[in-house]
Image (cartoon, rainbow, N blue to C red):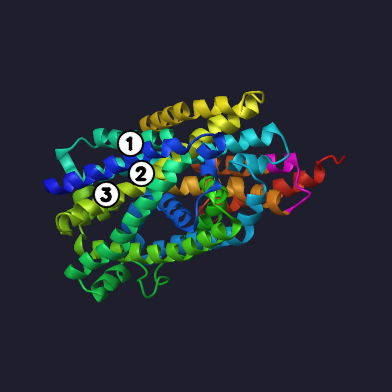
Amino acid sequence: MTLIDVIIIGLYLTIMFGVGFCARKNVKSVSDFLIGGEGFGTFYLVGTIMATLLGAGMLLSVVGAAFQYGSGMVWNYIGFSLGLALFAVLFAIPLRKKQKNTMAEIIADRFGRLPRFIAAVFAALYAFCILAMGILGMSRMLMYIFGDAMNSNVATVISMLVSIALTAMGGLYSVVWTDTMQFMLMFVVVLIVSPLVILRNVSFSEVNEALMNVGGSITNPVKNVPVPYILMGLTTMCISVPGDPTVPQRTLAGRNDKMVKKAFLICSVLALVFGFALIFVGGGAVALLPDIVQTHGTTEAAYPVLIVKYFPPIIKGISISALMAAVVSTATSMLLVGATHVIYDAGQSLFPKVRKETLQKMMPLGIVIFGSITTWCSMSVESIASILYLAFSLSGATFFVPMFCVLHWKRVSKWGVTLGMLSGALYVLAVQFLKFNTLGGDSVYVGLALSLASTVGASLLFPEKTE
């Protein structure tokens, strides 16, 4: 690592902080803070959607998973792509017609405070998991890059302070602006720079063969990949997109329906492109760093170590900044979602008479507290991949069915959405903490079925009273 690379990384963090500082002048209401005043066009929507969903878990774990499953991890991105297309067709326009600010408000709809509070709790828990994963990813990434030359915990805290500051200052305005810049950086590094550097050292056939030796190849992503693994990647990622609390927030922030739908369809295509590009990077890491587990203890080190060892100066600093951008983008989005659902949704559910102006003033403090608690708790997390699957399974099993029914089924009731969220979420959490076997190897299948049965059954048994 040269001095110029360190300067580039420092410049990147400074620019992100500056953008957050400039964005604060646009925040004049709760709506401005939460959904950016509904003023973002297609370009900014694509940037913020992709940057948020391409976090540390997706980048580090996908490249690292190539050592175990070859190209099998690409099925996560195929499911991711299908989920984005599904959201564009079935969810985006009906969701915008609700004219709400958060996922909890959308699901609660006309049903009162109880379902809103429950949705807020699980949305905040989801944000907590993803944020903890991002913090852990940042800490480990810096450790792999700098080794003993830098205290990774100190560097992680500095990065989180930047994320907390820019989110607290500008809300969704600063998040979207920085997301767009960071996605452009990730686009260049992942889709252009990384493949070119790898092809300077090994051929495409060598990369393909390296992947084929451990699982599926780029040209045949099915070979040697277990069918349950394929189904888990497709299902979990597909339903996690509509269930992700950050996705409705981006939908509501769009300037008009056409731009929002177009943005999600573009992201659907980009998800596939990124998936295959990251699998190629993973194959390059398998070919160039076959002893990564012996030297660093985990395959999650593959991408950052590949950059340190094979990328030239300046390009190396830019590429490390791109990996940090993936973490910071996800962190800012989850900070906003977590604090919003705690302060705005849970707060209004418990104290319905509180003024929105008061909540707006409390939001920055909520972001600081939520970020600080998550940063402290994340130090005890061991695996990025495990918390990634927990978060995606939780969001899909909790929110997918209730939100779909709120948007498309007139007979859905208060107890339907409430029990639908509770049954799906509690099953996923029970599997995680009680460690029992579940159908298909992922709790999302049974959780989704329970949520569907509870939502439909309770809505029919306890219908809403009509005037």
Element marked by disc 2: helix
Lateral position of residue 187 relative to residue 24, left or right:
left
Residue 145 in sight from this viewpoint: yes
* Image marks 2 and 3: residues in contact by CB distance under 8 Å: no
Mark closest to the chain's N terminus, 3 or 1: 1
**How far apart are the two marked residues, 2 and 3, measured between alpha carbons?**
10 Å
Q: Is residue 416 magenta?
A: yes
- The disc labelled 2 sits on which kind of residue? Val
Lateral position of residue 324 relative to residue 385, left or right:
left
Element marked by disc 3: helix
Residue positioned 28% across, 65% down in the render = 192
- The disc labelled 1 sits on which kind of residue? Val
Instruction: Using the image, determine if residue 106 lies above or below residue 112.
Output: below
Name the foreground residue: 208 vs 256. 256
Magenta residues (range): 409-418
Where the C terminus falls, by quadrant? Answer: top right
Mark closest to the chain's N terminus, 2 or 3: 3
Lateral position of residue 202 relative to residue 140, left or right:
left
List the residue tagged with mark 2.
Answer: 328
**How far apart are the two marked residues, 2 and 1, measured between alpha carbons?**
8 Å
Q: Is residue 131 magenta?
A: no
Lateral position of residue 458 relative to residue 374, left or right:
right
Residue 434 in sight from this viewpoint: no
Q: Quick one: label 1, few (<14), some, or many (20+) residues within 10 Å? A: many
Mark closest to the chain's N terminus, 2 or 1: 1
List the residue tagged with mark 1.
Answer: 162
Residue positioned 53% across, 52% down in the render = 240
List the residue tagged with mark 3.
Answer: 321
**Residue 433 drawn at (x, y percent):** 49, 38
Residue at the left extreme?
2
